[in-house]
Image (tube, rainbow, N blue to C red):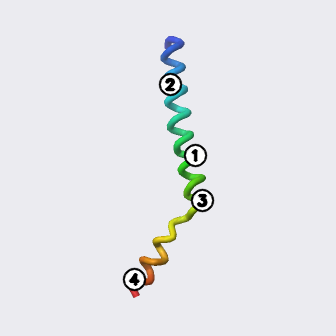
Amino acid sequence: MTGSAIVMMLIAMITLWGGLALALINIRRSPDEGQDDLAQRRT
């Protein structure tokens, strides 16, 4: 692999894994509050 291909691969990997990590952090900080509302509507 050429140097530019390795750099592009690293950028893509950091973007994907970083996005996944940020999504998980965001879910942990603010859990879905809509599930309680849904449970109340069904009863």
Residue at the spot of label 4 = 41
Residue found at x 57% / y 62%: 30
When asked about the image quadrant of residue 39, the answer is bottom left
Residue at the spot of label 1 = 21
Question: In the rendered structure, which disc, 3 or 1, sits on the residue that comes first in sequence?
Answer: 1
Between tags 4 and 1, which lies in front?
Answer: 4
The numbered mark at residue 40 is none
Question: In the rendered structure, which disc, 2 or 1, sits on the residue that comes first in sequence?
Answer: 2
Furthest residue toward left? 42
Asked if the residues shown at circle 2 and circle 1 are in contact, with their CB atoms under 8 angstroms apart, the answer is: no
Query: Alpha-carbon distance for marks 3 and 4?
Result: 25 Å
Between tags 2 and 3, which lies in front?
Answer: 3
Query: Alpha-carbon distance for marks 2 and 1?
Result: 18 Å
Residue type, mark 2 in image: Met
Residue at the spot of label 2 = 9
Residue at the spot of label 3 = 28
User: Tag 2's secondary structure?
Assistant: helix
Query: Alpha-carbon distance for marks 4 and 1?
Result: 33 Å
